[in-house]
Image: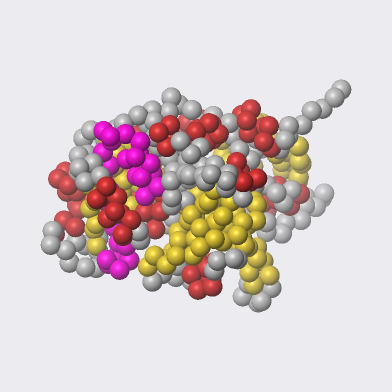
Amino acid sequence: MTVVRQTAAEQAAATGRRRASFHTLAVDEVRRLTDDAIEVTFAVPAELAGQYDYLPGQYVALRTTMPDANGNPHEVRRSYSICAEPRSFADGTSEIRVAIKQDLGGLFSTWANAELKSGDVLDVMSPMGAFVSKHGRDGKPVEQNVMNSMNHPEELAGEPGSFVAIAAGSGITPVIAIARTLLAAHQETRFDLIYANKAAMDVMFLEELADLKDKYPSRLALHHVLSREQRIAPLLSGRIDAEKLKALLGTAIHADDVDEWFLCGPFELVQLCRDTLADRGVKPEHIRFELFTSGKPDRPEGNIGRPVTADESQDTYKITFTLDGLQGEVSSPTHARESILNAALRVRPDVPFACAGGVCGTCRAKVITGKVTMDENYALEQDELDKGYVLTCQSHPTTPDVTVDFDV
């Protein structure tokens, strides 16, 4: 019997799903946005351009090696949303732009804001994520739209419609890319943005948003809400709570004829918006959301290759997985409560993952046989769950044998 294995490119073309992979890219520019945020532009050479096709709203994972608290080198991965609409240049090259806001105690973000400069190189994962417009896409999967429609905003945007985004802080990063694309694609499209920050000095892309408003004065509505600065309109001052959100939806925006909602920010705000929209009768399939984190800082960000040793004398789970057409197998001690991702990484270091906290969805796989339990899920939608997909960073076997497929 002859076994034919597809290359990653052939598999992506056949299934519409691209393999998440890292390539080393050079930093072309670092631009200061605010006192604690930068925009980083990576140059993508022509030979890699196809690996970095993306839809507005998707993210990339950045990987580098940094010293830990003891000075020992260790791998660090962080995910950041792409903040520009897709475009390529005449010579076949392209670029990836991300915004990195310094987090309190954030190892990577602190380093990037203080030291990252033009000419530095980082490993950048191919774009991933489902925080994209699905309006008028005929139910096609996200990856298929990437493969078919790169750099053609008029195709990416689908049909004209009414859109609303609610973002906080660096949540503007994917939203500004989505807004630019949708507004440019159709003269009838309307976009409302509620953007929450502490103060005016914290507003990322302030000039870009003002320019976008000047370009589309009648179709783009901007509502800056500042929690620590007094604005003329009381509705735009203070923290967004349930009462303020209901007032904003009732007066400031056209909330009754919205085709699609985009929510991006910390867990508490996104969940408040989802609950409020559900109370208003908005169907879940019309809501896209993305989180900074799970909102549970006391929880570890998944099991990222922690050491686990299987002993033949102990009870173990047998985990079988398929990646890039190749099958792997690993035993996991039942007492260790090891995630499927952690187990797979012990025998296959190139298993895809980014945040390992149940937020990004990079480690998604389909359960073929057996059963698992999933701790957290902030990335998969209900239709994916119904089809058997899980986040392997959050999934633990509950049957002696479990088989998952990263390729489907």
Instruction: Give the number of callouts.
Output: 0
Point out residue 408 in the picture as x, y percentages from the top left corner.
62, 32
Q: Residue at x 35, y 59 (%)?
A: 205
Q: Residue at x 65, y 77 (%)?
A: 70
Q: Residue at x 79, y 28 (%)?
A: 4
Q: In terms of depth relative to the viewer, which is nearer, 71 or 30?
A: 30
Point out residue 234 in the picture as x, y percentages from the top left corner.
13, 59
Point out residue 328 in the picture as x, y percentages from the top left corner.
76, 41
Q: Is residue 182 magenta?
A: yes
Locate residue 109 relative to residue 5 in the image: left or right: left
Locate residue 149 relative to residue 289 in the image: left or right: right
Residue extending farthest to the bottom is: 70
272 in relation to 1, above or below: below
Q: Is residue 160 magenta?
A: no
Q: Residue at x 27, y 67 (%)?
A: 199
Residue extending farthest to the top is: 1
Quadrant showing the N terminus:
top right
Locate residue 210 relative to residue 34 in the image: left or right: left
Residue 338 seen anywhere in this rendered image of the structure: no
Residue extending farthest to the front is: 90
